Amino acid sequence: MICCRALNKRSSNKIIEFKGVITNDTIRYLRGKHKKYTSPCMATNPIDRCWRCRENWAENRKRLALCGLGFGRKATGGDEGDYYLVTDNSDDDVLKPKPGTLRHAVIQNKPLWIIFAKDMHIKLSKELIVQSNKTIDGRGANVHIAYGCGITLQFVHNVIIHNIHIHHIIESQGGLIRDSEDHYGYRTVGDGDGISIFGSSNIWLDHISMSECQDGLIDVIQGSTAITISNCHFTHHDHVILLGGSDTYSNDQYMQVTIAFNHFGKELIQRMPRCRWGFFHVVNNDYTHWKMYAIGGSTHPTIISEGNRYIAPDDPNTKEVNGNSF
């Protein structure tokens, strides 16, 4: 039995809407669009069993905040705030984002549970800088962040990102970007990471499909801690997950990250994850492809690898699961 937290009594069900209507097409992209399934809903791990097979999950989306496990389990995202309905996939103005866009939602100073009115492909013109106490919840829609810049969590806390696709992310050119309602600043050139977590805590990334970013899929660096990466699908990439960015940044010894229930799939090369300094629990993941190594470490990390399935490549030179000092 999983012990769950009670939702905060201040949690709101108000929907902030700018255009369009919110629908209750609840299982559309959980079971597959235009497909009929007669078999029972299958939830194969404790996180999904907490919410996935409940027919009324769309009326109680914030139950997801009860379901986190691992070091990022305290992340509740925007459960104390209103719902924010994204209706517009544009990203034309990074200094004065248009209401109804994802960028306008994530820079708000208050807690928000961000949902999507319809299927969307969002091409970010600059990195998307997310404020604290946010949930980005793509359930019920097919949401892709692709062919533009990635997501940045910098010096924030309590963020959940759930059920979106991130792929073909390119280097950000930098410039002036708004990062909150009352502040904007100059950003340098970005690396092209899918998700960059910098100096942040209580972060939960769940059910994200990621591939083909210019640099890493996920980077967790500069003292970030209390993070869970779960139920994600990674394909077609070289540097998959980096946990700790420098052999000289000893504050990363306090980093704690859980990597659980993920599928490391086709055309991956290395860093699943690559760990420095901290404490890492890599549990119940499925590794079906790698070209160099799966799990790597240097600078005295503690890595507990538990209950993972490894299918080694045919190349006798790359059959080892672990890599040291890469």
Image (cartoon, helix red, strand yellow):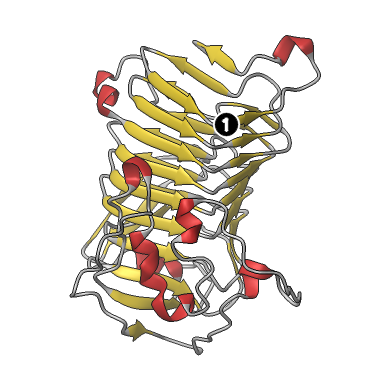
Amino acid at pointer 1: Asn
How busy is the neighbourhood of tag 1: few (under 14 within 10 Å), some, or many (20 plus)? Answer: some
Where 261 sits versus 127, above or below?
above
Residue at the outermost front position: 1
Where 311 sits versus 89, above or below?
above
Identify which residue, 120 or 48, lies in the foreground. 48
Residue 295 visible in the snapshot:
yes
Identify which residue, 4 or 275, lies in the foreground. 4
Q: Which quarter of the picture shows residue 164?
A: bottom right
Q: Is residue 317 left or right of residue 285?
A: right
Percent x, y of residue 52? 52, 66
Q: Residue at x 73, y 38 (%)?
A: 266
Q: Is residue 210 left or right of residue 276?
A: right
Where 5 sits versus 251, above or below?
below
Q: Residue at x 28, y 38 (%)?
A: 199
Residue 173 visible in the snapshot:
no
Q: Residue at x 63, y 31 (%)?
A: 309
Residue at the outermost right position: 314
Q: Residue at x 50, y 50 (%)?
A: 150
Percent x, y of residue 213? 60, 42
Label 1, secondary structure: give it: loop
Q: Quadrant of the N terminus?
A: bottom left
Percent x, y of residue 119? 61, 73
Residue to which mark 1 is pinned: 308
Percent x, y of residue 248? 31, 14
Where 168 sits versus 20, above or below?
above
How many labels, in total? Answer: 1
